Image: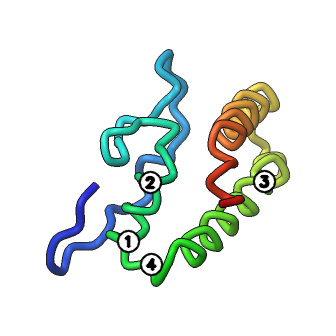
Amino acid sequence: MHLWGNEQLAPFYDVTFSPSPYKEHATAFAGFGKNPSLKVMQKLANQANFSNWKHAQQVIEEVVETINEFGDIANELNIEQNTINLIKKQLNSVYLENKSLLTV
């Protein structure tokens, strides 16, 4: 994803859960559908006008904290337990694959 001039990031449409055999979203991050490198994430943070990598990490951590509430919110919304479990499993897998981005 590139930002030019006065363009803004796209709405949050690509986070809608859609299980696929490829286990990644249609939108790529600098060519990475999943597991972008630290260097790529830092470059994207810079393109998104974060003041520095630490600030971007803080936002990532806030998103992770919110995602961790998914199961409780899904239960309140009466989403089927099988669906909740499937989504939680995928969220946890993505977190484990990318948690190193939070500790650098």
Which percent across, then down, holds residue 22? 47, 20
Residue on which disc 3 sits: 68
Amino acid of disc 3: Asn
Give the CA separation, mark 3 to mark 1: 26 Å
Instruction: Give the mark, 3 or 1, whose residue is nearer the N terminus.
Output: 1
Type of amino acid at the residue the image marks with label 4? Phe
Question: How many angstroms separate mark 4 from mark 3 (CA)?
Answer: 24 Å
> Amino acid type of disc 2?
Lys
Instruction: Determine crowd level at label 1: few under 14, some 14-19, many 20+ residues with C-alpha closer than 10 A.
Output: some
Q: Describe the element under mark 2 as helix, strand or loop.
A: helix
As measured in the structure, the alpha-carbon distance from the residue carrying label 1 to the one carrying label 2 is 11 Å
- For the residues labelled 1 and 4, say whether their Cβ atoms are less than 8 Å apart: yes
Look at mark 4 in the image and give the residue it sits on: 50
**Residue 39 marker:** 2
Task: Tell whether label 2 touches label 4 (CB within 8 Å).
Answer: no
Determine contact: label 4, label 3, CB under 8 Å.
no
Q: In the rendered image, which quarter contains the C terminus?
A: bottom right
Tell me if 72 is positioned left or right of 8 in this view.
right
Q: Which mark is residue 85?
A: none
Q: Which is more N-terminal, label 3 or label 2?
A: 2
Residue 94 locus on image (x, y percent): 64, 38
